[in-house]
Image (spheres, helix red, strand yellow):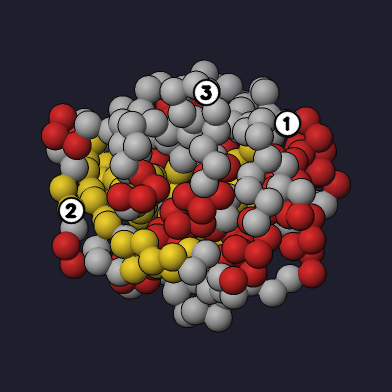
């Protein structure tokens, strides 16, 4: 099999965040695909709870400084990078004072989901794709892991579709145990439309629940991976009903798991 260029857009990765099913799988998958000869770029948000000194993050000046407009407000894009020496993996971090300086990931001290999580996801998606353009790097597969990354497929299909770097890319999304209980901001549809997305199917986001958000995103995916036994069963069935190329759930203990991922990408 020829090597691929795989862009991983991850909501969380250990060791930068505490170990969860999703953060652990993201870490293992990136390393496994690199070891199988694929060229990898990996992105995640630079949440404020990440210790920059301990993890040796540093800003990449040549990639930073762009302003992204979200809902008529300017937000500066800062790119930082760090390495996991034991795995020879480099991680790019999307940072911004407004969205990612708070010492938390998705919820506040009372366990309430942040009201601007929708804008944080939009900024993260835009930041990743604009940075990939600056790198002049053309992925063959983009794999989105975690709902914070799930706006990326919308951009690829509706905003960057004619960009030579992304024209032939295959999009994969993971269905994980990452459910948000509070619907996203009711203005999400308008914010996405203001990003240049023209799509009559956006009406489903008038009620931006977790289910509606993912149903919309699944429609733009070429492949769907079930990464958790606790993934929403209705969304798994929806992906099947849409005829999406599926990689069903397998335990990380399965010796063939990452070989199956490699074949899955090859079959897209």
Q: Earlier in the sequence, mark 1 or mark 2?
A: 2
Q: Secondary structure at mark 2?
A: strand
**Tag in front: 3 or 1:** 3
| Label 2 crowd (10 A; few <14 / some 14-19 / many >=20) | some
One can see residue 194 in this view? yes
Q: Earlier in the sequence, mark 3 or mark 2?
A: 2
Q: How many marks?
A: 3
Query: Quick one: 190 or 151, which is closer to the camera?
Result: 190
Q: Residue at x 44, y 23 (%)?
A: 109
Q: Secondary structure at mark 3?
A: loop
The answer to whether 102 is drawn above or below residue 199 in the figure is: above
> x%, y% of residue 50?
28, 33
Q: Is residue 31 left or right of residue 148?
A: left
Q: Residue at x 40, y 41 (%)?
A: 30
> x%, y% of residue 223?
66, 51
Q: Residue at x 44, y 65 (%)?
A: 73
**Separation of residues labelled 1 and 2 (CA atoms):** 37 Å
Q: Residue at x 76, y 37 (%)?
A: 236
Contact (Cβ within 8 Å) of mark 3 with mark 2: no
Q: Which residue is identified by label 3?
A: 111
> x%, y% of residue 33?
41, 43
Q: Which mark is residue 232?
A: 1
One can see residue 261 in this view? no
Quarter of the C terminus within the rendering? bottom right
Q: Earlier in the sequence, mark 3 or mark 1?
A: 3
Q: Which mark is residue 59?
A: 2
Q: Is residue 7 left or right of residue 183?
A: left
The answer to whether 153 is drawn above or below residue 118 in the figure is: below
**Separation of residues labelled 3 and 1 (CA atoms):** 21 Å
Q: Is residue 34 left or right of residue 89?
A: right
């Amino acid at each position: 099999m020829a090597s691929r260029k795989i862009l991983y857009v991850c909501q969380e990765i250990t060791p930068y965040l505490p170990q969860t099913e999703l953060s652990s799988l993201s870490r293992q998958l990136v390393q496994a695909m690199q070891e199988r000869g694929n060229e990898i770029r990996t992105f995640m948000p630079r949440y404020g709870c990440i210790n920059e000194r301990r993890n040796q993050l540093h800003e990449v000046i040549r990639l930073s400084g762009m302003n992204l407009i979200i809902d008529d407000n300017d937000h500066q894009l800062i790119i930082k990078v760090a390495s996991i020496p034991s795995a020879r993996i480099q991680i790019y971090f999307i940072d911004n004072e407004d969205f990612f300086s708070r010492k938390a990931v998705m919820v506040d001290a009372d366990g309430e989901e942040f009201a601007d999580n929708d804008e944080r996801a939009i900024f993260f998606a835009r930041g990743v794709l604009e940075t990939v353009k600056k790198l002049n790097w053309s992925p063959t597969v983009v794999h989105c892991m975690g709902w914070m990354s799930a706006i990326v497929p919308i951009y690829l299909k509706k905003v960057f579709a004619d960009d030579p770097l992304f024209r032939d890319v295959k999009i994969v999304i993971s269905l994980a145990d990452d459910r948000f209980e509070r619907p996203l901001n009711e203005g999400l549809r308008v914010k996405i439309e203001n990003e240049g997305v023209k799509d009559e199917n956006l009406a489903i986001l008038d009620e931006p629940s977790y289910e509606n958000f993912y149903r919309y995103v699944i429609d733009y995916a070429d492949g769907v991976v079930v990464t958790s036994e606790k993934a929403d069963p209705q969304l798994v069935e929806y992906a099947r009903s849409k005829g999406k190329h599926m990689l069903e759930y397998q335990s990380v203990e399965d010796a063939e798991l990452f070989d199956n991922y490699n074949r899955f990408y090859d079959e897209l």
